[in-house]
Structure formats: C-alpha cells, structure tokens
Amino acid sequence: MALGHATAAPNPHGAPMQNRMSQTEFIALIAMMFATIAFSMDSMLPALPEIGAQLSPDNINRAQMILTAFILGMGAGTFITGPLSDAFGRKPVILVGAIIYIAAAFVAWRSSSLEVVLAARVVQGLGAAGPRVVAMAVVRDLYSGREMAKMVSIAMMIFTIFPAIAPLMGAGIIALTGWRGIFLAFILFSLISTLWMGLRLPETLAPENRRAFRPHLLAAALREMARHPTVRLSIIVQTLCLASLFSMILSVQQIYDVIFGQAKNFPIYFGVVALVSGSASLLNAAIVMRIGMRRIVTWSLGAQICLSGLMLVTSEIGLPLAAYFWIFVVWQACVFFIMGMTMGNLNAIGMEPMGHIAGMAASIMGAISTVGAALLSAPVGLLFDGTILPLAAGIFLLSIIGFALMLKMGRIEAREAL
C-alpha cells in the first residue's frame, strides 16, 4: 500500500504539527511501539522451562510469574502514563518509560535470583506502558476522523502479526544466546524504537495544549465509573476475559512441553493459532452492527462455557494422545478467538457513557482490568499439575461468571429502556 508523505498532519488539539515522517514510516514506528507488549511477553514463552530449571528447580511453575509480573507492572503503568503525557508531553513520557524498561531488562539479564527477575519484570512492565499507551495519543495528536482510523487500523494489523512470530523469535534467541539473551533483545528493541522516535518524530502535543496532572480528577473519574452499573459490569467482565487469556498464555508452553512433548514445535503452533484467531476482529466488525455488542459478548462467553466444559470432559476420558493434542490446539484457538470477539466490544460498552472523561476512563479501565486479570490468572497457572484440568476448570469458571454478569447487564439495559 502506497502512503503519501505527511509533512503537516492535522492536529485536533491545536495548530498543525510538523511531521517529518512519511505515513509509511509513521505507521511502522507506531506499530513497533504497540508491539513492545507482545514482544516482552510472548517471546518469553519458550524460555520458561530453562528459567524454571535454573532459578526455581523445586517449583518450575513459578517461572510463569515472569509473565504475571510484567502484566502487573504494565497495568499499573497504564493508569498514569496517559495523564502524565497530557501534562508533560508525549516524547518525555515515552523516553522515561523506555529508560525504565531498558534498566529493568538489564537487571533481569544480570540477575541469578528469580525474585530479583520478577521485581525487574514488574518495573519493566511499568516502563513498557509508556510507549504502548502514549503511542495512541501521538496518533490522536496528528490525525483525526477517518485518517486517524486508517492509521490505527494499519498499525494494529501489523501489531496483530507480532504475537504470532514473537515465540519463534524468542526460540531463535535462546538457541543462539540462552534465555538471558532475550533480555538483551528487549534492550535492543527498545533502543531502536526510542532512538527512531527521538530522531524522526517531533513532539506532537504543544505546550499550550497540555493539562496539569491532577490526581483528584482521576479519583473522581474512578468514583463515577464505579457508580455506573453498565460501566462497572463491563470492567469486571473485561477483567474475567483477560484472565482467561492470561491463564492460557501462562500455561500453554508447559502443556505443549510436559503433556504433549511438543516443546520444539510450540512456537510454530502458537504462531499459527495466533494468526487464525486474529480473524476474530474481522468477524466482529462484520456482525456487530446487526447483532450488537452486548449480545456478541454474551454469546461468545456462552460458547466459551460449552467449549471449556467439553475440554474438561475430554481431559478425563483417556483419548489417544494425538487426538487429545489436536483437540487442545482447537480449544486454544477458540480461547484466543473469543477474546477477539469480546474485548473490543466490552471496552466500547464501558466507554460509551464516559465520553466526557474518555482519556481518564480508558486509563482506569485498562489498568483495573489488566491488574485484576493478572491476579486472577496467576493461581490458575501455578496450579498446573501436568494435566489440562486446572486451566480448563479456571477458564470454565471465569466464563460462567462473565456470562452471568452479561445477562445482568442485559436486564439493566431492558429496565432502562422502559
């Protein structure tokens, strides 16, 4: 796709900002910033067995906490990075976030203690929230309307490919350097994107358009969101859906390795499943206007209950290992696919009544759901016992609760419509 040069993109917050980058280069940079999260998580998956064997030989399940720690830090960082960038500008927040991310990756690379690595991963998650969250604000500064939608769509299309290749990249790095080399790759990745941004992208938020950071406004927004029943339910269900996704990510490598002996092929299977499940957003876009967001989420969670229940039954009936493996792969793809059918709709449901505080509401919603999901999914991963039972039971229970809450949301909407 040929994209023209954007030398003076419209800025909805004030006068046009001068952008030296072509649209193609700008999209590539934004996609790389978006991909920081996927690279920081999914490339670690092939390293978990070695990390567990070296740093926690008595309980290798604890290696999963390297993912959970990062998610916790990222969720906490999501709460403040947007408002901070509104107060101090986009580039300073991205730069400080990158410095924190790089420093934490260096500490994790040098550490010989799992506890220190976990602490470093929490801090690394805090730093990663900067480029991931603020990148969207940069797009909003430079573009508006359909032009903004086009920029985001293309960047997100590139971003969705990254989770598919990140485990394969991680496996290649491990083969060349060992698991510690992945942390060096994080440093290199962040240096490239930060230097690229620093040299080529001007500050996109003019000083006269900045807003002072006021914690009491965030607290007021949080109270308002908590009082609104639909918003409150959408955040809880988002948390449950994300917890299902994180539970699968935490356990999936061990399942391929321990149960099916497919550790070497895991990055390939994971990549194919990620690519296939990425089509969920296309299906959702095609049907959401006819069916509606709440119904799609409710039906998707109902399907998840049935599929997870079937997986629970299958895990107990002693199928041949080859058949059992392919049933699990299909279920894994369904879990990822259903996340694509629910998360965007839930976010839109929660944001719709909060248009007057959209920026703060997005930060609060993202922070609460991410941190809450990390806390809910961690026990599911730690319960891995060489079977699929803990994972299937965990997702089954989370889906039942989410389904019940969506039915409650439907009753609230019906009452309000009277």
Image: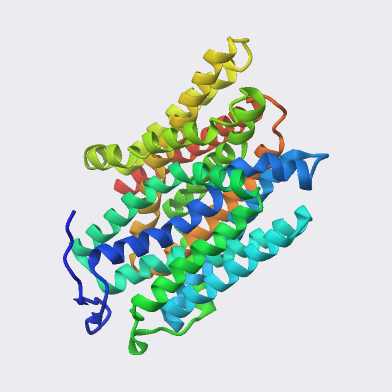
> Toward the viewer: 364 or 117?
117
- How many numbered callouts? 0
Is 19 positioned to the left or the right of 43 in the image? left
| Residue at 24% in and 59% down | 149
- Place residue 385 in its image quadrant: top right
- Place residue 60 in its image quadrant: top right
| Residue at 53% in and 76% down | 96
| Residue at 56% in and 64% down | 187
Is 397 positioned to the left or the right of 115 in the image? left
Where in the figure is residue 45, as x and y percent of width and height? 59, 43
Where in the figure is residue 271, as x and y percent of width and height? 45, 37
> Toward the viewer: 41 or 376?
41
Q: Is residue 333 above or below residue 158?
A: above
> Toward the viewer: 265 or 402?
265
Can residue 358 be seen here? The reply is no
Can residue 304 be seen here? The reply is yes
Return the residue found at the far bottom. 208
Figure coloring = rainbow
> Toward the viewer: 351 or 165?
165
| Residue at 60% in and 63% down | 124
Q: Is residue 315 above or below residue 27?
A: above
Return the residue found at the far right. 58
